[in-house]
Amino acid sequence: MIEVALFGAGRIGKIHAGNIAGLRGQARLKYVVDVDRDAAVEMAAKYRAEVRTVDAALADEAVRAVIIASSTDTHADLIQKAAAAGKAIFCEKPVDLDIVRARTCAHTVGRTGVVCLIGFQRRYDPTFVALKQRLDAGEIGNAEMLIITSRDPGAPPIDYIGRSGGIFKDMLIHDFDVFRWILNDEAASIYATGSCLTDPAIGGAGDIDSTAVTIRTRHQRLVQISTSRRAAYGYDQRFEVLGAKGMLQAGNHKPTEVLAHTAVSVSEDKPEPFFLERYRAAYAREMEHFLEAINEDVAPRATINDGVKALELADAAMRSWREKRVIEL
Amino acid sequence: MIEVALFGAGRIGKIHAGNIAGLRGQARLKYVVDVDRDAAVEMAAKYRAEVRTVDAALADEAVRAVIIASSTDTHADLIQKAAAAGKAIFCEKPVDLDIVRARTCAHTVGRTGVVCLIGFQRRYDPTFVALKQRLDAGEIGNAEMLIITSRDPGAPPIDYIGRSGGIFKDMLIHDFDVFRWILNDEAASIYATGSCLTDPAIGGAGDIDSTAVTIRTRHQRLVQISTSRRAAYGYDQRFEVLGAKGMLQAGNHKPTEVLAHTAVSVSEDKPEPFFLERYRAAYAREMEHFLEAINEDVAPRATINDGVKALELADAAMRSWREKRVIEL
Amino acid sequence: MIEVALFGAGRIGKIHAGNIAGLRGQARLKYVVDVDRDAAVEMAAKYRAEVRTVDAALADEAVRAVIIASSTDTHADLIQKAAAAGKAIFCEKPVDLDIVRARTCAHTVGRTGVVCLIGFQRRYDPTFVALKQRLDAGEIGNAEMLIITSRDPGAPPIDYIGRSGGIFKDMLIHDFDVFRWILNDEAASIYATGSCLTDPAIGGAGDIDSTAVTIRTRHQRLVQISTSRRAAYGYDQRFEVLGAKGMLQAGNHKPTEVLAHTAVSVSEDKPEPFFLERYRAAYAREMEHFLEAINEDVAPRATINDGVKALELADAAMRSWREKRVIEL
Amino acid sequence: MIEVALFGAGRIGKIHAGNIAGLRGQARLKYVVDVDRDAAVEMAAKYRAEVRTVDAALADEAVRAVIIASSTDTHADLIQKAAAAGKAIFCEKPVDLDIVRARTCAHTVGRTGVVCLIGFQRRYDPTFVALKQRLDAGEIGNAEMLIITSRDPGAPPIDYIGRSGGIFKDMLIHDFDVFRWILNDEAASIYATGSCLTDPAIGGAGDIDSTAVTIRTRHQRLVQISTSRRAAYGYDQRFEVLGAKGMLQAGNHKPTEVLAHTAVSVSEDKPEPFFLERYRAAYAREMEHFLEAINEDVAPRATINDGVKALELADAAMRSWREKRVIEL
């Protein structure tokens, strides 16, 4: 039975708390930490946990694992402290907005030898996992091209965008991770361009809302990423891999399998509304995997080094966009 | 070069005339016969053919084939005359509304030995043909159940319904033919029921517009047919075969492959509007096959005996519906 | 907090126990009862419940609800006892194989006024529920025809078939319930036929494995049901409703959204393997609804009278099949 | 009745000859010109046309239109001569491999005022046309991103590749045209990268077989093009447009609508094998449009200036690829 301290009782923290509860007999939420005390109290009550401060939670030797689901600017400090305390760490992406701090965290994790899993939940999505397994099994031969589509249903509030580190660190960081995971390959060069098309306020905040990114890998493969802050039809999360012997596509998930034939058209459900619905199964599987990493000493599917790599690509993409040129890596 | 006389310059006659023209160098429309002289003249002008009477057309020894696309009540007489004249015959379904007359025609055809193909065009539809080939090749093992869906976009005029012989002879005759063709099997019993749900005037004409038919075959297979005079979403022509090792389905055809994602749904085109669009390729292939049957002495894919069999089933279905009981065959 | 006694710790009992645990704070599994003591002990340990006899469990006034997931032959007795003890009842289908006993149970439930929900889980499936809501909202106008496809991936052991009451009571009872629920209509006549096509041993046990059923409703609608004990491609659970203004279809669910393009074809996942996977969400929703029925005094979506009605149709279908005739109801 | 001279009796010439024949009464093939005299004679015999030299064909005043379907290196000369002779011109893409010569042709066409249509047949494909009409009608609001997928089933012979002008002028020229047509917009910058992944011989010929192109338009839209010389699953011709209110996708066409459910998967036909099958309807419609352009004085849907623009983009793409940098236009 792994006892867990959870830092952050917000939207994503609630998902993780629920998933720990679902792992009845294997893990238990012991402490909830949040600067919003009401949120912490409510969650603690629901799961029979207790509210604590960071230091108090880390001081309890019975706590073997922490989940860092608080705001991005707290991640690095919490990773440092938790690693120093010898706890297994599950940290939401990104490690930090600053690559130097992120690398320092990775160094600490390496030195202390604690388990550290970064929350790239797409690596646990049943559709994406099945595609990767079939690709790795050789079903379509050697992969040649990867096309990633990643569009949110709508933009977050402008003040969030201002703090987000920009679309490349906030949204595409997932795509930069997925591409490395799917292809088992690294970027050799990157070209990123983008526009502000959905809301001038996003441009006013110094950001863009629509991007087109091209990566050439060390093995000469070609990757194209298409992202937007706004897809009127829901959360659009697809990709396709062209290989020597065929193509594999990962499509969107939809709520039901109802098909309607009318005088106008034949229609089905649009995709799931957003990440909480689309990645429900992925989040649950990710938490199971965190326990496996702790109990069975298997390497986390997404390590802190993966977190650093994705951030490096986000930095390079931002530079490419600003300087209007290809960046060699 | 086969020279052809066409009886009937209406909707379906025009299809056949166009398809003959497409068989450049293999067949030529020589005569057009129609009680509507204007229609005959117009078609003759278009294809450089001549207008003739039935007898004049049949008297020309250069004419080797006739196409009977005139009204149902003329079919039997024309078959008799054309067979007597030694012409190859392509006759639209049904042979006749009266089973005795239909059998007499079949007898004449058999006695004279002329080629006679009945216009069950579904047997030439690319989707249906591909399904049958795959079924016959053993892809899903022995066929166990067949589900046929056959729905028109809307009912014909009431006066047509009154002359049509009823829904079983007018619409389901195609389904009774398709089932025999797909399964290579014969009906052992039939149960038909139906309702008048779309327009009371159809009931007023002594007919129904919605039917559910069940056939048990000599090999114990089960066939279900679902028909309606009205499908608001277009022409619905599907079937599925369940076999020991899987299932094959034949779906509708649609005009384009556009997919629209909106805030409401993901939609594609509804099916083709009606038989002229859906069976365009089938009609062309059917005419090619008619020439093959003449030139290469291959048996027509749909013979006059198939026409008689389908009519027998339509008669049995009508009896089942009226008497509310299962009919053993 | 509703405390629950569960009768039956087998396959379906485990589903219900897990779903109660998921309703943290609203319900709690207090007692497990099973003739297989090891199964009972194991489940009790997992959920911190206790093992009891039927009578002991019912004698505890703190227990407000029972779940009957034991073998069919025990259902009627347990309903009688639980109703007498004033417990809310969730009972798996069928109420009993004997219509007289089932009616007696329904009478007792009515007299005692206890909540009684019959486990027709399809009424809670997200796809089926969405279809019904859209139908009831008038999206396709008045329903005219309903086509139900219901095929298991494979037959149960022959000795189970011998005890099952036959395919109509064992498998089609769900379809007889679904049709009434979807259409808000009752059967006026029924015709059932069938064959033994997948395994002669099923015929040897006096049963069939493939059926075709036709129901005509009081409102003249037409219903066709196609069932088989064997679909090589997985669990096939579909239906379609034709209405005056269109058609709604409920399709199968599949494990992932991977699409593979190869030199042979474009393929997607086959349907979920069986009911535990397909109806996972339905079972969870059903348990939530049971609590709503207890707490909020709403009528159960599937009452014991619905259970009786489905059984009456199964009896009529069996008679129709044996006597090869249409049964008027 | 438009009398036509056809230059080139090869694969694409045959398509055009067949389509002219299908326009019975509106156009007639009068002359066939080809350096391969046997091919010319065969085609002439089939369509009752005559074999002529270029000059003889152009000298006949009765000939109002020419179709240039000969090898690329002959296009420019034939356009010049035909324009000088006052003939309406249908010329296959590209106008020429050299942009200067192409511009000279465009100048001549402009000066002489002859009708000149360039064979960008995708502009007539029913699926693409429907998508564009719906986009122009505002169905998804303002277009923001366009993703084009364009993959051949297999590479042409290496000696053809050597003469082809490279993948950007040979394959992507269609994509460069489609993007301008769909978006009614022009490129502001282009970035092209690529690899040789399918066959080293292609690299040996100085070419690549896989490309990823990004275009930023004058209206800040983003276009991504993915091409490959090899798609094992057939001819892959898709695109999607993301707009403010939704997304429109144009999918592949397939030969039949058969769906197969097996123990392995649910599969449908792979896409049509290559352009002759996929664009059969487009080629027929294109020829009809050519006659409309002549008879009704409507502007050709694809003019010689469109041909020049596509070539300019191909040149820029080649430069971008070779110099590994973004090209501003």
Image (cartoon, coloured by chain):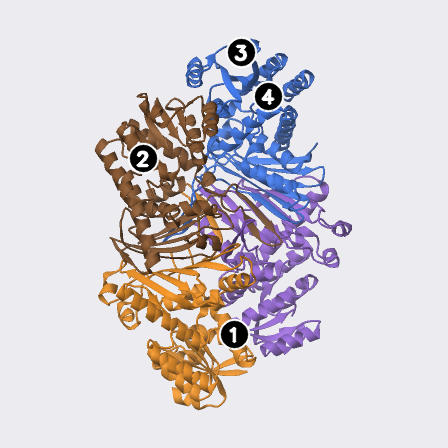
Chain colours: A purple, B brown, C orange, D blue
Q: Mark 3, chain letter?
A: D
Q: Gap between marks 2 and 1, in whole Å?
A: 68 Å
Packing grade of label 4 (10 A; few <14, some 14-19, many >=20) is many
Task: Please state which of the two labelled residues, at mark 2 or mark 1, is closer to the viewer.
Answer: 2
Amino acid residing under circle 3: Ala
Q: Gap between marks 1 and 3, in whole Å?
A: 82 Å
Q: Nearer the viewer, residue C194 or B175?
A: B175
At x 61%, y 32%, the residue is D176
Quadrant occupied by the N terminus of chain B = top left
> Is D92 left or right of C266, judged from the image as shown?
right
Q: Position of residue A261 (x, y in %)?
A: 52, 52
Amino acid residing under circle 1: His
Residue at which label 1 appears: C289
Same chain? Circles 2 and 3: no
Task: Please state which of the two labelled residues, at mark 4 or mark 1, is closer to the viewer.
Answer: 1
Kind of element beneath mark 4 = loop
Residue at which label 4 appears: D96
> What is the number of the mark on residue B143?
none
Q: Mark 1, chain letter?
A: C
Q: Position of residue C142 (x, y in %)?
A: 51, 60
Amino acid residing under circle 4: Asp
Task: Please state which of the two labelled residues, at mark 4 or mark 3, is closer to the viewer.
Answer: 3
- Is the residue under label 3 in contact with that under label 2 (CB below 8 Å)? no
Q: Gap between marks 2 and 4, in whole Å?
A: 63 Å
Q: Nearer the viewer, residue D119 or A128?
A: D119
Q: Nearer the viewer, residue D98 or D124?
A: D124
